[in-house]
Amino acid sequence: MIKTTTSQIAEILNTKLIGSGDTLIENISTDTRQAVENGLFFALKGEKFDAHDYVEKAIEQGCVALVVERELNVSVPQIVAADTRLALGELAKWLKAKLNPKTVAMTGSSGKTTVKEMVAKILQKLTACDDEVLYTFGNLNNELGVPLTLLRLTEKHKFAVVELGANHIGEIAYTTAIAQPDACLVNNVAAAHLEGFGSLAGVAQAKGEIYRGLKAGGTAIVNLAHYYPQWQQDIGNHDMQSFCYTGEDKDSYADFWAEDVELLLNGSRFTLHSPQGEIAINLPYLGEHNISNALAAASLAMAVGADLATIKAGLEQRSAVKGRLYPIEINQHLLLIDDSYNANVDSMKSAVSVLKNYPAFRIFAVGDMAELGKESAACHQEVADFVAQAGLDLVVSFGKESAVISQNEAYHFTDKAAMAEFLTQLILQKKAENQPLVLLAKGSRSQKMDELIAMLCQAF
Ligand code: ATP
Ligand code: UDP
Ligand code: MG
């Protein structure tokens, strides 16, 4: 946030200020569990709490003014807004438009955080100092997270990279209107969060909203392998650039594609083709899907001014993201891959494709996929069929619905400690046989498959 007075903020929000008009605000807060200096506290109503009950605490924690939905009996200035959630978005939109850094936004069913990290790394190579690039912290990608991300903007930022998530129709339209991107992307469309959208077409519609929010003169990036013609209307007259792993899809040719792909045990090598020419890339991320993510990142970065050499430098710098195909080498016999961050049908398949290629005893430790609504059983079956085709050496499952994936009662667990104990014995046995072993753990966030990884790390 830049230094702003309470009277300026009331004017921006077009609403009433109660109390002194020139209190200086330097930070934004929505949570009394964190202290701030010279903070403006937005009292939000959530599922569990109404933050109007916590304003005294907020003042103790360093807030010098409030945004509230009703006037309260407090000592500090109050800005009264009809809806504090919308007011937060409104202020973020104002700040973004005022400072106007080049902004890149991405949505999609998977790979958003990965692409975001890749783009941020590339753009940092264009700036004198890394902190001139603002990017979404972790996974703060919803209707509160996006404004809170953008409200961190200050004059020093040259670029902003924002991840946009969607749980319902209209959410991306809302967050894109706040972010006003110069380049944006739908990375892919898959059976994730189906509960909120009903069908794949519903997911595509919700994600396509990002293109409608492009700034004038901005660039729409599309993945040819996940392109929905209905988006043409959303994209309108904006410039469009496409990428595709294989170079073409359904008779269309991509602007960015990969050639001479070599999948390695610790990443991949490929030639990146772009409208500015080609360059060899050593990508320190596992799996084919990350080559696609790298093409997405390259397309977005070039749209806001990165050249090929900068793109190469950024992509080759690994920012290992915990929980996302994160390799943990225990010893020369044992590699654990922690992909426990989340799961949907496509990302399950990507993970299995990565695991399949290892010249070792390959164990897939799979947990349930959540939030799939009435499609859930069919989605688990689809993963089960894919896993069966892959011919892994062992599949163990945890939870409930993933039992169809291991296809064997003896290999299905509802207790993680028992699962870890079973795997520990097996790992010891393979070690005695001098056979290298790779175990990949994956499931929805709620399944916490990282706990299994932690137990195995402890055991070895
Ligand atoms: P979330 O919706 O939880 O924010 P996300 O879209 O940010 O997820 P990432 O965190 O980048 O996605 O990746 C999550 C998982 O999805 C990864 O661990 C990986 O297995 C898988 N994944 C990443 N990119 C792709 C892709 N392009 N295609 C299929 N699966 C992918
Ligand atoms: N909140 C707070 N202090 C608390 C508990 C909640 O400031 O001790 C805020 C919280 O940050 C959010 C709002 O109250 O802005 C509504 O909380 P919610 O129901 O969303 O709960 P949360 O998931 O944040 O715990
Ligand atoms: Mg994410």
Image (tube, rainbow, N blue to C red):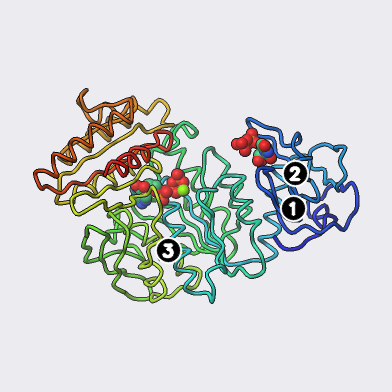
Q: Quadrant of residue 11?
A: bottom right
Work out whether 210 lies above or below 309.
above
**Most extreme residue toward the front, as rendered?**
459
Q: Does the residue labelled 3 lie within 8 Å of ligand 1?
A: no
Give the x, y percent position of residue 426.
17, 36
Q: Which of marks 3 and 1 is in front?
A: 1
Residue 39 circle label:
1
Type of the residue with mark 1: Gly
Quarter holding the N terminus is bottom right
Give the x, y percent position of residue 138.
50, 51
Callout 1: 10 Å neighbours few (<14), some, many (20+)? many
Callout 3: 10 Å neighbours few (<14), some, many (20+)? many
Q: Earlier in the sequence, mark 1 or mark 2?
A: 1
Q: Does the residue labelled 2 lie within 8 Å of ligand 2?
A: yes
Residue 58 circle label:
2
Q: Name the residue under label 3.
A: 241
Q: In this view, does 161 lie to the left or right of 280?
A: right
Front-lying residue, 23 or 9: 23
- Circle 2 sits in a helix, a strand or a loop, which is it? helix
Q: Nearer the viewer, mark 2 or mark 3?
A: 2
* Badge count: 3
